[in-house]
Amino acid sequence: MSSTGPAVILIGPPGSGKSTVGPLLAAQLNTGFLDTDDEVEAVARKPVGDIFVEDGEPAFRALERPVVERALGYQGVVALGSGAVLDQQTQRLLAGQQVVYLETGFTEVAKRVGLNKARIPVPGNPRGRLRAMLEERLPLYASLAGGTVRTDDLDPEEIAGRIAAMTGITAAGSGR
């Protein structure tokens, strides 16, 4: 594994499986796992959802920025929060890293984050906001990743196995 950064950095939309696949991949590679959303929660001493509701997205992003920067020095598997890629400094830091995009279709994302019910389109519609968020972020995920794994119809172990095979990283760290 790289001595200058994470073995693998997972990016993708909410519900793509980063927090589930990451520990499985880390176990396959015999390394550790770090989730930047968990780290932000530890710093803020409250859940990500509460930070967004109580303090707003700008406050969350301000907490997230230094957490992501530190995480990119971590030697294991790192899962970035879905919006971390919006930050231009983070985009620069990801250059040259082993970044894998967990590509997940809208229907699957909506199901995984609990928005699988069709809703009447109204201002503030959660499904509409999710679709707009994905339209903004999907091109970033694709452009920042060195590899992509389509997660629809795969179980987390299969996804982790595909990432390990794609990256060529082994538990001993050879192949990279």
Image (cartoon, grey):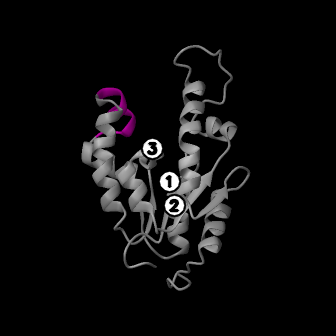
The residue located at (36%, 33%) in the rendering is 57
Q: Name the residue under label 1.
A: 19
Q: Residues within 10 Å of mark 1 (few under 14, many from 20)?
A: many
Q: Name the residue under label 3.
A: 83
Q: In the displayed structure, would residue 126 be above or below residue 35?
A: above
The residue located at (60%, 78%) in the rendering is 168
| Residue 118 lies in quadrant | top right
Which label sits on residue 22?
Answer: 2
Q: Are marks 2 and 1 in contact (CB under 8 Å)?
A: yes
Q: Are marks 1 and 3 in contact (CB under 8 Å)?
A: no
Residue 48: say if magenta: yes
**170 relative position to 118: left or right:** left
The amino acid type found where label 3 is placed reads Gly
Quick one: SS at disc 1? helix
The amino acid type found where label 2 is placed reads Gly
Q: Which of marks 2 and 3 is in front?
A: 3
Residue 11: say if magenta: no
Quick one: SS at disc 3? loop
**Magenta stretch?**
46-54
Which residue, as the protein is rendered here, is positioned at the far right? 153
Mark 1 and mark 3 lie on one chain; the one further toward the N terminus is 1
| Residue 158 lies in quadrant | bottom right
The residue located at (55%, 51%) in the rendering is 141
Mark 2 and mark 3 lie on one chain; the one further toward the N terminus is 2
The residue located at (35%, 55%) in the rendering is 68
Q: Main secondary structure of the magenta part?
A: helix
